[in-house]
Structures are given as C-alpha cells and as structure tokens.
Amino acid sequence: MVLISACKQEEKISTIIRPVLTERVEIKENWQQATYAGEVKARYKMSLGFRLGGKITERLVEVGDVVAPGTMLAKLDADDIQLKLMEAEGALAVAMAEKKKAELDLARYAKLYKDKMISASEHLQFSNSLDIASAKVIQARAYLEVARNQLDYTQLYADKGGVITSLEMEVGQVVVAGQTVVNLALPEEKEVIIAVAESRLDEIHHADEIKVSLWIEPEHFYPGRIREISPGADPVTRTYQVRISLLNMDKKVQLGMTTTVFIIRKKKQKVVRLPLSALYQQVSKSDLHKTPQTAVWIYSPQTSTVHLQQVKVLEYQFNDVLIESGLNNGQIVVTAGVHELHPEQKVRLFQTHHSVESASENH
C-alpha cells in the first residue's frame, strides 16, 4: 500500500509543467558602453587679486554667489593710500603756485627786458623757471592720478559676471599685490570633467558616441564631445583628466552638478545580449575534472519543451552576458529557472517572450 502511494506521488511530480521566463534571440551590433561619474565645471575661469598689497577690511561675497560685472568683491585698508592721495594733492597745489609765481615773474621781467633794464640772460633765466614750474605741475598731476588709481585698487571688482567658486582670503589677512583671493567661474560655456584610468584611455580615444546625463534627471541625455585629454596622469590617483564639452546644453545644467558620462563604442562583431541568469554550466559526472561547458536552454514552441545548446561567451557586463556564437535569430532562450530544468522537459511561459534589446537601445 505504501509503495503504490509513493509511485503515484513520483508520477505526479514528473508531470509538473514548470513556468519559465524567456527572451527571443536577436543578433545585433555590439555596442559597448562604459560609464563614468563626472562634474560640471566652467571651461573658463578667472583668478582675481588686488593690484597692490594691504590688509583686507571687508569681504563682500561668499562661495557660490552669482556676481554681475562690476560687483565689488572685497576691500583693503585705504588709510595709507588716502594719505598718499592728500600728499599728491598738496604737491600739485604747490606746483601750480610755483608755476603762477613763475608766470608773474616772467611777465614782470619781460617788460624790464623790453625796456633794456635787464640782460637777455636774466630774461632767459625767468623763462626757464616757468618751463620748470610747468613740468612740475604735469609731474604732480601724474602723481595725483596714480594716487587716485591706487585708492581705486583698494577695492576689488569682478571684471565679468560669473559664479564664485572659491575664496582665498579672510578679513584681517594681509595680501601682496597680485595674490589670488577670488576664483570666478564664467558660466557661458560649461564642460564635464571625468577621471579615466590609463587602461581605459583607448576606449576614450575611439569613442563612437558620448552621452551625458545629470543625476537630477537621469532619463535625459546631452550629446558630448571630447575637448581635451590630459597629457599626464594625476600623481596621486594615476588617472587622466578628460574634459567633455556639452552640446545642446540648457539651463538645467548648473556648475557643480554630478553627471553620468556614457562612452559608447561599436565593435566589429555582432552579438546576442542575454541576462546572466540565462547561462547554464553543463558538467557531466564523468568529466568533473574538466572545465564546465556554457550553454543555454532553448524553448521549442511546437513541443513546449526545452533542450540545451552550447554557446560561446564573448564578455560579461554587469548583469548581462554577450554571446559571440551558438545562437540564431528567432530562437527563444529561457532566462530564469535554468537550474531546475532537464532535457525535453515540458514548460510553460510565465509571460510573453520579448526581443533581446541591443546595447545601443539600452543606452
């Protein structure tokens, strides 16, 4: 009685029709993709500094501020410059007074010379004195203009509009002439910078297509073009900096945003892309010491059964595998539950099979 019950149970198990997921094979161009994290930066930058040295008394901007052309950024202590300006103004007043005196002297002695009361040499002496006084006035005016310019130089202005990316100053700090205190990024033209390992430079040089997406909007892509590849590696990371110009850029792209850069290349051979779950390692008991053979389960619609078919793997990519040979267009491959199957087993489709997408469509 027990034996009969066991036989019926075994017969019932053997007739179970297992549900499977499938995909239809489609041989397409081998588009390969590499992804990199990048950052949006300005192509053009300005390093600003005071044109004379001094002590910083005011800092009028912060990192991230958007400034217009002519915006005041910082100030220096102008007390000494004010004194120099006053000194220059006084020197000009003295020079003008001396010139006026020289003009009066020349006019008086010119009359005496006309009346032959003084000699020609004496008249020439007063004429030369006027010329010297006039030159001193010109010199004093130049010194006054320099002092006024230096007073203006105690205030740092933005030459062009942009975004403050960094500040290298604090109130009370003493700086020298020309020292960089503000870094300004010009937003007219933006680019994305990525770091690429030396072993991956070849795929950068031979990229067929470049696409860039923002992390805040990953479904939207901007076409890109490689503008520059650094000639030398970073001494710390040993990676090469690659600058990518963004084409058809809109206002959504802002400085400092994080991006994903897709480097896409078209290989010569055609392949079939399948999920890794479709692979089945075929090992016979007599060949346990040998390398397992890679195969997939092929579904036959006429008989609703499956059979194994050996394939040659070209490359593994994340959750996918590229099949170089062993499959034909239109074949239906089981993609889930492969380790629960056996040859000529009847199965049913869990859902309608669909075409295997090419790498270019996925991108």
Image (cartoon, rainbow, N blue to C red):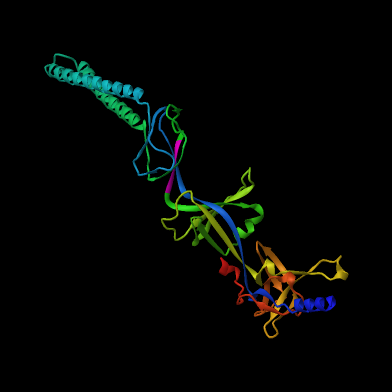
Q: In which quarter of the image is the C terminus?
A: bottom right
Quarter location, residue 31: bottom right
Q: Say whether residue 141 is left or right of residue 258.
A: left
Residue nearest the observer in this picture, 102 or 152 = 152
Residue nearest the observer in this picture, 150 or 98 = 150
Please report the residue visible at 24 percent of the width from the left and 19 percent of the height from the top: 94
Work out which residue is located at the far bottom of the displayed protein and give it. Answer: 302
Please report the residue visible at 70 percent of the width from the left and 76 percent of the height from the top: 327
The question of residue 221 being in magenta is answered with no
Work out which residue is located at the far front of the displayed protein and give it. Answer: 1
Work out which residue is located at the far left of the displayed protein and give it. Answer: 115
Q: Where is residue 144 in the image (x, y as percent from the top left)?
A: 29, 27
Please report the residue visible at 64 percent of the width from the left and 47 percent of the height from the top: 238
- Eyeballing the image, is 52 above or below 344? above
The question of residue 183 being in magenta is answered with yes
Q: Start and end of the magenta stretch?
A: 181-186
Q: Is residue 132 visible?
A: no
Residue nearest the observer in this picture, 40 or 349 = 349
Work out which residue is located at the far right of the displayed protein and give it. Answer: 286
Please report the residue visible at 84 percent of the width from the left and 78 percent of the height from the top: 1
Q: Say whether residue 286 is left or right of residue 256.
A: right
Q: Where is residue 110 in the image (x, y as percent from the top left)?
A: 15, 19
Residue nearest the observer in this picture, 116 or 321 = 321
The number of numbered discs placed on residues in the rendered structure image is 0
Q: Where is residue 30 in the image (x, y as percent from the top left)?
A: 63, 69
Q: Say whether residue 269 is left or right of residue 344.
A: left
Identify the main secondary structure in magenta: strand
Q: Where is residue 254 in the image (x, y as percent from the top left)?
A: 44, 51
Q: Can residue 147 be seen in this view?
A: yes
Quarter location, residue 128: top left
- Eyeballing the image, is 322 above or below 237? below
